Image: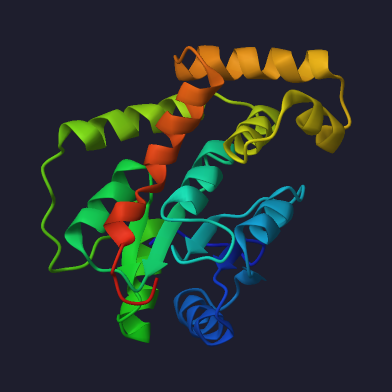
Amino acid sequence: MTPVSDRARFLIIDDHPLFREALHSAVQMAYPDVDTVEARSIAEAIELLADAKPFDLALLDLSMPDVHGFEGLLQLRTRYPRLPVVIVSGYEEPKIISEALSYGAAGFIPKSARKSDLAAAIRSVMDGAVYVPENYEGQPPDPDSTDRADMVQRLARLTPQQLRVLQMLRQGMLNKQIAYELQVGETTVKAHVSEILRKLNVYSRTQAVIEVSKLDNAELFRDQAGF
């Protein structure tokens, strides 16, 4: 087992207090000396990750109040590509697990797992393995999944500021509104938009919004219990 120092930090991202407590307990079982920090939203997690002291692992629930589908995972993977992110979710559909892994998740742990299994899964990821449920059978990639995985790679090229601009574009904000929010000039916003289009290999802001929106994969979660 790879040793974890008492300075190591884990970030638990879940909006349900009881499950944050359960995850904290599982982390303590796996690594009694690790520091555990909790976030109740993706926005709060990003604020914590901006801290100068790095985290060694993030445990993320897919069902968060401020994001849809895989959007939270994508934000963390594009902003912090070196941070291992493990999904801990009530969804156990093979398609959802496959998509999460294709977007760079370091593992997928069902919320139905026992605490001892959660702890073992966390240790497995910290040892460098990609953890999946024992009964999971990999899904063959389809063209849409391949295209989405390619878009994730392109999103990883964006700077944090460009990601913020892209999120505002998705909200339908105009350049002058984005400039006001970011406290920059419209010329700077236009430069960011141009770079976003270039890095995503699209030709218009509308196309950028459409292509990135596909990554939410809302259709995978429709009618799934607990979302």
Question: Which corner quadrant holds the N terminus?
Answer: bottom left
Q: Is residue 32 above or below residue 83?
A: below
Q: Position of residue 175 (x, y in %)?
A: 74, 24
> What color scheme is it?
rainbow
In the image, what residue occupies the spot 73% across and 47% down? Answer: 50
Horizontal placement of 49 versus 182: left or right?
Answer: left
Q: Position of residue 177 (x, y in %)?
A: 79, 32
- Say which residue appears at 45% left-offset and 75% top-offset: 30
Q: Residue at x 31, y 76 (%)?
A: 225
Quadrant occupied by the C terminus: bottom left
As drawn, is 17 to the left or to the right of 200?
Answer: right
Whether residue 129 is visible here, answered yes or no, is no
Between 17 and 217, the one nearer to me in the picture? 217
Residues 27 and 184: in front is: 184
Q: Position of residue 142 (x, y in %)?
A: 15, 36
Relative to 171, residue 205 above or below: above
Number of marks: 0
Image quadrant in which you'd find residue 79: top right
Residue 124 visible in the snapshot: yes
Q: Residue at x 62, y 12 (%)?
A: 194
Q: Residue 26 at x, y = what percent?
A: 46, 80
